[in-house]
């Protein structure tokens, strides 16, 4: 399965947006927890190679991946996802980005699409548990 961490996050953000799931661009805890769960629960299964390469730091309350942290911050810095309030919990994805990411999502191999579906279901639960159940 040939999908990078960056592609995975972009596609997951798009799927969360389509499903009207609120995501926080300030609170990265649910993102780290989600990726950690995906990394541990899918060992031995067909999954993207980047999961095996992620390193998690357990110095805090939850596992953190520096690579994931940097990518989430980059989404705002390059205006792929635009925060519309100071709390960074309301956002929009520009139409051009939605179209671009949707086109790329449509070209994924079936295994990658299935893995994203699995990740989306886990993400719905993770974001709901973090207090972000519906997108505004």
Image: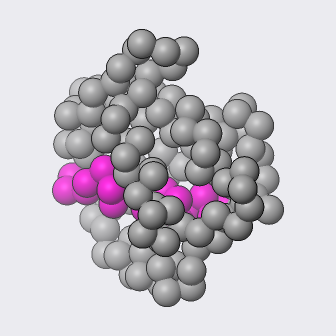
Whether residue 72 appears in magenta in the rendering, the answer is no
Percent of width and height locating residue 19:
67, 62
Q: Is residue 132 visible?
A: yes
Percent of width and height locating residue 107:
31, 75
- The image shows residue 43, relative to residue 95, as above or below, that is above
- The image shows residue 103, relative to residue 11, as above or below, that is below
The magenta region covers: 1-19
> Looking at the image, which residue is at 23% across and 42% down?
50
Prevalent SS, magenta region: helix
Front-most of 50 and 48? Answer: 50
- Left or right side of 119 for 7: left
Percent of width and height locating residue 134:
78, 53
Percent of width and height locating residue 53:
20, 34
Q: Is residue 116 visible?
A: no
Q: Quadrant of the C terminus?
A: bottom right
Front-most of 50 and 119? Answer: 50
> Looking at the image, which residue is at 61% across and 45% down?
26
Front-most of 37 and 60? Answer: 60
> Looking at the image, which residue is at 61% across and 39% down?
27
Whether residue 4 appears in magenta in the rendering, the answer is yes
């Amino acid at each position: 399965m040939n999908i990078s961490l960056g592609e995975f996050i972009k596609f997951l953000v798009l799927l969360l947006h389509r499903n009207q799931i609120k995501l926080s661009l300030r609170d990265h805890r649910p993102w780290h927890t989600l990726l950690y769960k995906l990394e541990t629960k899918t060992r031995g299964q067909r999954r993207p190679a980047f999961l095996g390469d992620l390193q998690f730091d357990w110095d805090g309350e939850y596992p953190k991946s520096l690579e994931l942290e940097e990518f989430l911050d980059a989404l705002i810095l390059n205006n792929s996802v635009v925060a519309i309030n100071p709390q960074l919990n309301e956002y929009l994805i520009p139409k051009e980005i939605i179209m671009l990411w949707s086109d790329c999502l449509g070209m994924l191999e079936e295994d990658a699409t299935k893995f994203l579906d699995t990740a989306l279901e886990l993400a719905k639960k993770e974001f709901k548990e973090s207090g972000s159940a519906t997108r505004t």
